[in-house]
Amino acid sequence: MSTAPNYAEVGAFVGLDNFIAVFTGNGLKNILNSIRYVLLSLVVVIPLGVAIGSLLNRKIRGNTLLRTLIIIPWVLSQTVTALLWRWILNGNYGPIAYLVYELTGRKVDFFSSAGSANVMLVFANAWNTVPVVIILTVAALQTIPGDVMEAGQMDGATRWQIYTRITLPLIRPTIITAVVMQSMEYFNMVTLIYTLTAGGPFDSTQTLSLAAYQNAFNYWHMDIASAYGVIIFLLNIVFSLVYVKLLNTNRE
């Protein structure tokens, strides 16, 4: 007489077997995918957010409207963002694929190769999260006293020199804070990746957090999912210690 498996049942202690299964499978690849996803996203989001925030801090016509519009992507959930970009980038009926076909006569599928899928994933993530960095940058810039800038101008410094040698160093703690916040969010992100690529093609966009989710709720491999969760927890601790060190160095 066979009995149905009980997924909530605690089994025998297996030691490090689950971790060995993770690293003999796709564990190392998922770690590298996670690190690549975080680094590429930061490379795009942080400089772009600081640049746009610096522009929006200046007195220009329509500044209030621009600040309002720039917030819209951040208000949208990760699910909505992923569905939006999956439609825009769809190789059969997406508007971008249609424009490419009209211009070149060739059909494109942005999610058919590992390289393009990773680029599109980072692009969608940047579109959704860059407003956070913009808001932090604008807030930090507005705390800089005006006499500091005037002193630089009186000393004969150009606008670029004032920006690179005075403004950026003064908002450096805010930039580091933005790096900490966003990198932790990207490392633990599931919804956007799952909805947009589901880890494909061929697990090229599967991160640690996505692997933990899929093993737990798609395959019911709670043991492997738990091992992934412990690995994510340990890596978060390592990243947190590095960021705390950076913040302390900045204060010194």
Image (tube, helix red, strand yellow):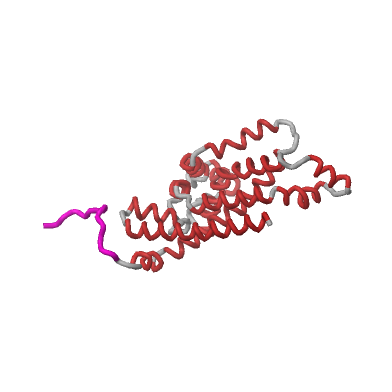
Q: Is residue 230 left or right of residue 123?
A: left
Residue, x 32% and y 54% (percent of image)?
A: 219
Quadrant where the image shows the N terminus: bottom left
Residue 161 versus residue 68 in the image, above or below: below
| Figure label count | 0
Q: Is residue 247 above or below residue 94?
A: below
Is residue 102 positioned above or below 206 on the image? above
Q: Which residues are magenta?
A: 1-13
> Residue at position x 52%, y 45% from top?
89
x and y, in percent, of residue 222 in the image: 32, 56
Which quadrant is the C terminus positioned in?
Answer: bottom right
Furthest residue toward left: 1
Please report the residue visible at 16 percent of the width from the left and 55 percent of the height from the top: 3
Rendered image quadrant of residue 60: top right
Q: State yes or no: residue 11 in magenta.
A: yes
Q: Specify the principal SS of the magenta part.
A: loop
Residue at 50 percent across and 62 percent down: it is 32
* Percent coordinates x, y for residue 142 in the rendering: 71, 39
Tell me where residue 168 appears, x and y as whole percent.
Answer: 72, 50
Relative horizontal placement of residue 158, taking residue 18 as reference (left or right) = right
Q: Nearer the viewer, residue 83 or 49?
A: 49
Residue 235 forms part of the magenta stretch: no
Q: Residue furthest front?
A: 252
Where is residue 206 drawn, in percent x and y? 45, 56
Name above or below for residue 157 compared with residue 11: above
